[in-house]
Image (cartoon, rainbow, N blue to C red):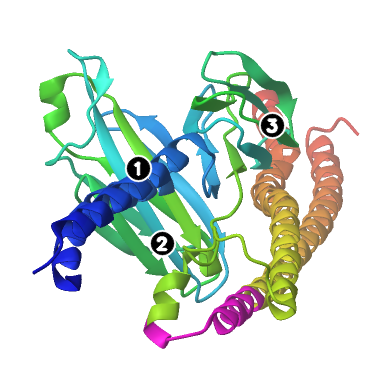
Amino acid sequence: MAGVGARLLLPVMGRPALLLLALCTAGAQGLYFHIGETEKRCFIEEIPDETMVIGNYRTQMWDKQKEVFLPSTPGLGMHVEVKDPDSKVVLSRQYGSEGRFTFTSHTPGDHQICLHSNSTKMALFAGGKLRVHLDIQVGEHANNYPEIAAKDKLTELQLRARQLLDQVEQIQKEQDYQRYREERFRLTSESTNQRVLWWSIAQTVILILTGIWQMRHLKSFFEAKKLV
Amino acid sequence: MARPGSAQRWAAAAGRWGCRLLALLLLVPGPGGASEITFELPDNAKQCFYEDIAQGTKCTLEFQVITGGHYDVDCRLEDPDGKVLYKEMKKQYDSFTFTASRNGTYKFCFSNEFSTFTHKTVYFDFQVGEDPPLFPSENRVSALTQMESACVSIHEALKSVIDYQTHFRLREAQGRSRAEDLNTRVAYCSKWFVVHNFHPGLMIINSENIVD
C-alpha cells in the first residue's frame, strides 16, 4: 500500500515542486535591464583579495511583432569578460542565453565585469533590444548554505555558526583591503607633494637663471649696439 | 491489495498543498534579496533598471556617486503605473524606503544628462523584502532556541558592520580618485609650465634678431 501510494505521490508532487523551483529560480534573478544589440555593459566590483564572485544572468529577446519579451531564446549568446585592477583579463568566455560565471580575485581592487551580446539572431528579429536579468553575489553572499549543510552534514546550529564565521572572514578581508587602500592613498598624496615641491623649486630656479641671463645678455647686446 | 482510495486521497492532498504553496508564492511577498551594483554612467546618458515586486514588499533603494565631476546624479523611481515615487536631481547619495503598493514592474533610472563631459561611477543597493532564510523550511512557525536567536542577532549585527564597511569604502574611493586625479594633473602641468618657462628667453633672442 505504501509502495503504491509513493508511486502515485511522486509524479503528482513532482509537478508543483518543479513549478515552485522554476518560480524560485526566476525570482532569484530579480533585477533586469535592457541592452542594445552591440552594446557592452560594464559593472565594477571593488573587492578584497581571495574573494569569490558569482554572477547569474538570464536573457530574453524582444519580439517586435508580438511586442513582448520571449520567455527564453536558445541560440542567444552573451560574452562575459572580467578584468582585474591591472586590466589583465581574468575571465573571457562565451555563455548561452542563460549562464553563470564565477571568478576569484587574486589582487584587491576594482574588477570590471563586462557583458555584451554577439548574437546575429538579433539582426534577424530587428528588435535590437535584449532584456538581461543579472544577479552578482560577492564573498559570503555567494555561499549556498543549504548545499554546504548537505555536503558537510551540519546541524542547524553548526550551519549558523558557519555563516557567522564566513561573515567575520569577509569583514577581516575588507579590513585588510582597507589597509592596502589607505597605504596607496598615502603614497599618492606623498607623490603629489613631492611633485609640487620639485615643480616650485624648478620654476623658481629657472626664473632666477632666466632673469640673470636676460640681464647679462641685454647688457652685452646694448653695449654691442653702442646704445650704452 | 492496495486501497486505491487512500493513494488517490494522498495525491489529491499533495496537489492541494502544492497549489496553496504556489498561490502563497505568487501573492505574498516571498523571500527577496539585494542587488548591489556599481556601474559607469557616461556623460549625457541615462540607465534604467527594473524589478518585478510583489505587493506589500518593503524595498529600499540606496545610491551613491563614487567618481566624476561634482559627484551628483539624477535619480528617479517609478511604480508600475508610471507614478513617480522618488525623484531627486543632482544628488550625491540618498536612501529611499517604500512599500510596494501593487504588483508589477518597478523602474528606477539614473541620469547624467546634465553633464557634458564627465563620466560618473554610481553605486546602488536595491533591497527587496527580507533576505532569504538560511533554511528552505524556515517558514515554519516555531520558536528559536536561545542559541539560535543569539546567532540571528549576531548575524544582523555583522550585516550592519559589512554595510558600514561598504559605505566607508565608497567614501574613501571618492577621496582616493580625487587624489589620483590631482597627482596626474600635477605631473602634466609641472612639465608643461617648466618647458614654457623658456618663453621669455626665446622672446628676447627673437626680438634681437628682428632688431638686427
- Side (left or right) of B30 relative to A9: right
Q: Quadrant of the N terminus of chain B?
A: bottom left
Looking at the picture, tell me which residue is in the foreground, A24 or A36. Answer: A24
Q: Please tell me whether mark 3 or mark 2 is closer to you in this view.
A: 3
Residue linked to disc 1: B19
- Tell me what residue is drawn at x 44 percent, y 69 percent: A144
Q: Position of residue A87 (x, y in %)?
A: 42, 60
Tell me if residue B10 comes above or below residue B121 in the rendering: below
The CA distance from mark 1 to mark 3 is 30 Å
- Tell me what residue is drawn at x 19 percent, y 39 percent: A118
Q: Earlier in the sequence, mark 1 or mark 3?
A: 1
Return the mark for residue A54: 2
Q: Chain of mark 3?
A: B
Residue linked to disc 3: B98
Looking at the picture, tell me which residue is in the foreground, A214 or A45. Answer: A45
Looking at the image, can residue B200 be seen? yes
Looking at the image, can residue A105 be seen? no
Q: For the magenta stretch, what is the residue range?
A: A151-169
Q: Are marks 1 and 2 on the same chain?
A: no
Label 2 Cα neighbours within 10 Å, binned few <14 / some 14-19 / many ≥20: some
The magenta stretch spans residue A168:
yes
Residue B132, located in which quarter of the rendered image? Answer: bottom right
Return the mark for residue B143: none
Magenta span: predominant SS is helix
- Tell me what residue is drawn at x 76 percent, y 59 percent: B164
- Tell me what residue is drawn at x 65 percent, y 38 percent: B58
Q: Please tell me whether mark 1 or mark 3 is closer to you in this view.
A: 1
Q: Chain of mark 1?
A: B
